[in-house]
Image: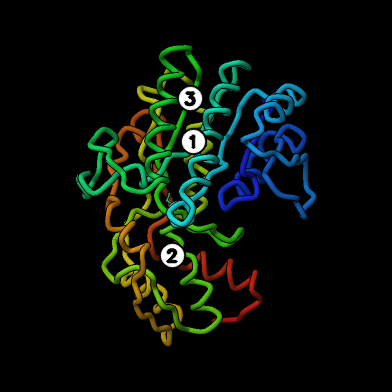
Amino acid sequence: MTRILITGSLGQIGTELTQQLRSKYGKENVIASDIRKNDGDDGPYHILNVLDKEGFSSLIKEQEIDWLIHNASVLSATGEKNPHLAMDVNIRGFENAIELARLNNLRILTPSSIAAFGPSTPQENTPDFTTMRPTTIYGVSKVYLELLGEYYNHKWGVDFRSLRYPGIISSEAPPGGGTTDYAIAIFHDALKQMRYTSFLNADATLPMMYMPDCLKGTIQLLEAEEEKLTQRTYNIAGISFNPAELASSIKKHLPDFEISYEPDYRQEIAGTWPKSLDDSNARRDWNWLPDFDLDKLVTDMLENLSNTLEITYK
Ligand code: SER
């Protein structure tokens, strides 16, 4: 049986990815890890600081790991508040992960992001291969990890894979410091107080994706036969929308919902990212196809979140 280690397992994506992989590969074969204590108790978990290379190495060896999903990362908005922390976790942490993948012959999947693009990138239908001059430290770290992973692949044959995620929307774990997180906060505030103040402009269109699609795409690329991969880093797209369009879709369920706009420094970050992605290579190479459009996402998100928050809205 394949043995999988996930770093950043308590993060927004890690939380749900761990559960999904455990139901597929068996609880005991999916080792979760993160920097803090885990209060949940549903499978093997280890505290791991990805900057502690010795500890990282021992965990891989002791647990006889085959695949490493390296999710530990500081997101865009937090990164701009603390660039040196982002450099440590995102750059040095990844260097440890990819080197340990080489030494232990692991398949390694590490997410990249729409943040890897920048203001000089074409913003509509952005392809996989284009100008990449990001202006955030988060984006810089993602371009670096894509290139270093690809270098390890052609130099030493390391089976490195990466996805450029759009903004991910989910109801289970709270998001942590991203620019796209307005699209999660809006649901919490809509259910709790029927109004939301957006830190992005009404027309700030960004590529977005619902968590079930994110999990589906991640597992598809993780499991894809290596011969099928014609490149190591792929765009994946779900839907593109802006705060005004998201608010209109929410209003179909909550007619009294109101949105207002007070853009802050995160608007500047969002303005440098693509509005939509061309993911035709992922569709061609490993059959990527998203399931959720905007209205379907909103219906499902309101349903799930209202259950979690114990709020009745219908
Ligand atoms: N969701 C991320 C962020 O906003 C983008 O990858 O930082």
Task: Look at 42% across and 39% down and name the residue there.
Answer: 141
**Secondary structure under the numbered disc 3 in the rendered image:** strand
> Is mark 3 in CB contact (under 8 Å) with mark 2?
no
Q: CA distance from mark 1 to mark 2?
A: 27 Å
* Mark 3 vs mark 1: in front: 1
In the image: residue 242, left or right of residue 48: left
Amino acid on which the number 1 mark rests in the picture: Ile
The three-letter code of the residue at mark 2 reads: Ala
- Which quarter of the figure has residue 69? top right
Q: Give the farthest residue toward the top.
A: 156
Say which residue label 1 marks: 91
Q: Which residue is mark 3?
A: 160
Disc 1 versus disc 2: nearer the observer? 1
Check disc 2 and report the residue beneath it.
183
On whether ligand 1 comes within 8 Å of the CB at mark 2, the answer is no
Q: Nearer the viewer, residue 199 or 81?
A: 81
